[in-house]
Amino acid sequence: MDQKIGIIIPARDGSSRFPHKPLAKICGVPMLERMWKLANQLDVPVIITSESKHVLESARRFGVPDVSLVLTGNCRNGTERVFEACRSRQFESVINLQGDAVLLPPWVIADLLAWMRTHAGEYATVAVPMDWEVFQRFEKEKVSGRASGTLVVCNMNHQAMYFSKNMIPSVRNKPEKSPYLRHIGIYGYRLSGLKKYMDLAPTPLEEIEGLEQLRLLEHGYPLHVVMSSMRGRTMWSIDYPEDIAVAERILQQEGEL
């Protein structure tokens, strides 16, 4: 097992949009248990961190050892929670794996891990191309207010130029190939880069969009975008209790991960 890099799953219990989300069940299995099992398909240590003793005690009940649990304070976002958890470990690099990404295929995480092992950059995230058919379904869900996914545009070196919940880029002359990239909200950090991030002041566009990764771009730090693929699987954000039913339908149709 690679001990120099770890996966940290921030599991915030006090979400205003979805209280106690980490322990909400999807097809009878708590969301956090699904994330634990998903992350453990990769050959690196996995840590669960939360501000809630109840969440951590629940994790113990489904088999997470004490050494893999970290109690944190009331952090402002998942990145701060990951940094606080890092201080009790000896990782040189970490993957911030969102605690609600239950539909994320393990090979997407593996693609980010592979990049972290073979490149020297301090910051990386993941995107998946959307063909026109997938994009049209995504746009329809967006317009209806049922989906909250984020899009990213990159430069020629696969560095992020901007992230938005809106449809970017704006297409005036439709090309044969869709230019749309869906951002997958997992991040790879070198410990040195994570420390720098923690010292950066929040930025105007970050606060307007509500997207913490924009802080890096506004301060001029390069954020590499690793290209991956869903291989036909459906991605869906779980932001509200009603999203549970959608996730369950997807798993029933496409099978467990």
Image: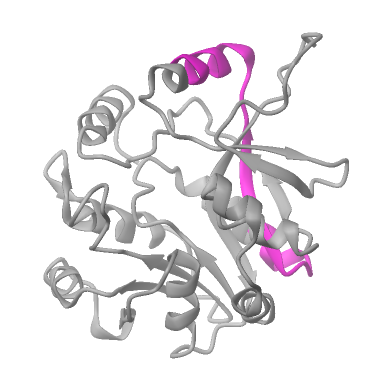
- Residue 112, relative to residue 63: is it above or below? above
- Please, which residue is most extreme toward the right here? 156
- Residue 131, relative to residue 106: is it above or below? above
Q: Is residue 49 magenta?
A: no
Q: Residue at x 45, y 17 (%)?
A: 143
Count the marks: 0
Q: Residue at x 11, y 43 (%)?
A: 28
Viewer-proximal residue among 21 and 8: 21
Visual colour scheme: one colour
Q: Is residue 122 magenta?
A: yes
Q: Residue at x 78, y 65 (%)?
A: 119
| Quarter residue 227 falls in | top right
Give coordinates of residue 255: x percent, y percent: 30, 30
Q: Residue at x 39, y 17 (%)?
A: 144
Q: Is residue 123 left or right of residue 82?
A: right
Range of magenta residues: 114-140
Give coordinates of residue 167: x percent, y percent: 62, 25
Give coordinates of residue 156: x percent, y percent: 88, 41
Q: Is residue 134 left or right of residue 204?
A: left
Give coordinates of residue 111: x percent, y percent: 62, 51
